[in-house]
Amino acid sequence: MIEQAGVVLYFTFMGLLGGFTWAFFRARRPNDLLKFYYVKRIVLGAIAGFLYYNIHTGYNLPNGIVAFVCGYFGTDFILAILRKYQWFKEGKKYGHSRV
């Protein structure tokens, strides 16, 4: 049980680290990291790492790297899913969107 919690925390931390790396490279000043936009991206990185934990196939070093990448790029993925969901919810079930 404790070992399982450690693995969940590991994947979540790697996603958080990926989200922080994304914010660090895009912030112009260190104070920018405290703005809501960057904090949101860091938290979404942690969520993406947690989501990756739920879909990974085994525990090893490459999965940790993929959790980091998922945290880095996963925020764009999550936001795209939310935009697609909003597009679908509006009744446009067929065709393509320009998301």
Image (cartoon, helix red, strand yellow):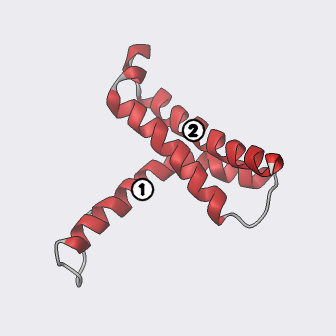
Residue 42 x %, y %: 48, 36
Tell me the residue at 60%/35% (across/down): 17
Residue 1 x %, y %: 80, 52
Q: How many marks?
A: 2
Q: Which amino acid does the dot numbered 1 rest on?
A: Ile
Tell me the residue at 44%/49% (across/down): 75
Tell me the residue at 49%/52% (across/down): 74
Tell me the residue at 33%/33% (across/down): 37
Asked whether 12 or 22 is in front, the reply is 12
N-terminal of the pair, mark 2 or mark 1, is: 2
Q: Which amino acid does the dot numbered 2 rest on?
A: Leu
Q: How many neighbours does mark 2 have within 10 angstroms: few (below 14), some (14-19), or many (20 or more)?
A: many
Instruction: Identify whether 52 is placed above or below 49.
Output: below
Q: Residue furthest front?
A: 1
- Residue 60: quarter of image: bottom right
As drawn, the label of residue 38 is none
Does the rendering let one see residue 56? yes
Q: Residue furthest bottom?
A: 94
Kind of element beneath mark 2:
helix
Instruction: Identify whether 85 is placed above or below 24.
Output: below
As drawn, the label of residue 16 is 2
Disc 2 and disc 1 in contact, CB within 8 angstroms: no
Residue 39 x %, y %: 41, 31
In this picture, residue 68 sits left or right of residue 48: right
Q: CA distance from mark 2 to mark 1?
A: 14 Å
Kind of element beneath mark 1:
helix
Q: Which residue is mark 1?
A: 78
Instruction: Identify whether 59 is placed above or below 57.
Output: above
Asked whether 42 or 97 is in front, the reply is 42
Q: How many neighbours does mark 1 have within 10 angstroms: few (below 14), some (14-19), or many (20 or more)?
A: some
